[in-house]
């Protein structure tokens, strides 16, 4: 399997989000880590799609953060009920703390200061989405990808 550096993966996440690919933050994070995990199936990014915009555009938990948690599950998740979840839960807690400390919230709408009503109005959302994409979310995707790499010990 190919060796991936932390920088390679962070750049891949950023490219998926920022270079016209049109992927949401959560899709970008899981796509950025897809090759690292050796996943070839198109389940990624499909499984992540409904969580964009803070869970289906509702401004709830940040999609990039949810994607990172999914990636932690890919490495540390269990395949049987006897396996202990302690390591996974600790790594998720570490990630949540880093995110909360940096952004002051876990919620997409609060980070982008968008009410749930705006998420459901395509005209209003389009007016502000580009601004936040460029000024907030690009950096956010890179930060989450880096914090995830730390938890994955890459």
Image: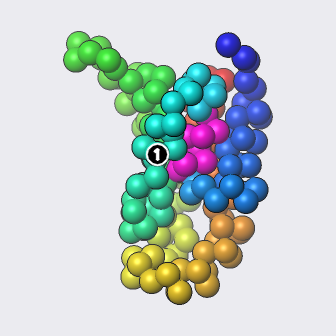
Image quadrant containing the C terminus:
top right
The percent position of residue 92, horizontal first and vertical second, equals 44, 36
Image quadrant containing the N terminus:
top right
The percent position of residue 122, horizontal first and vertical second, equals 49, 81
Residue at image mark 1: 46
Magenta includes 116?
no
Could you tell whether 36 is left or right of 70 in the image?
A: right
Q: Secondary structure at mark 1?
A: helix
Magenta includes 32?
yes
Mark 1, Cα crowd under 10 Å, few <14 / some 14-19 / many 20+, is: few
**Residue shown at the point (53%, 50%) measured from the top left:** 26
Residue range (magenta): 26-33
Q: Quadrant of residue 12?
A: top right
The percent position of residue 84, horizontal first and vertical second, equals 30, 17
**Residue shown at the point (57%, 57%) measured from the top left:** 24
Q: Quadrant of residue 86?
A: top left
**Residue shown at the point (60%, 55%) measured from the top left:** 23
Q: Is residue 119 above or below residue 124?
A: above
- Pick the front one: 20 or 14: 20
């Amino acid at each position: 399997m190919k060796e991936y550096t932390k920088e390679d993966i962070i750049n891949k996440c950023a490219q998926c989000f920022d270079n016209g690919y049109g992927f949401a933050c959560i899709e970008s994070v899981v796509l950025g880590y897809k090759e690292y995990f050796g996943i070839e199936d198109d389940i990624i990014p499909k499984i992540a799609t409904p969580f964009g915009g803070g869970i289906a555009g509702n401004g709830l938990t940040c999609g990039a953060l949810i994607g990172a948690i999914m990636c932690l599950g890919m490495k540390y998740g269990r395949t049987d009920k006897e396996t202990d979840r302690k390591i996974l839960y600790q790594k998720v807690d570490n990630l949540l703390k880093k995110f909360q400390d940096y952004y002051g919230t876990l919620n997409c709408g609060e980070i982008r200061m968008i009410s749930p009503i705006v998420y459901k109005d395509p005209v209003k959302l389009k007016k502000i989405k580009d601004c936040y994409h460029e000024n907030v979310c690009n950096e956010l995707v890179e930060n989450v990808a880096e914090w995830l790499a730390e938890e994955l010990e890459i």
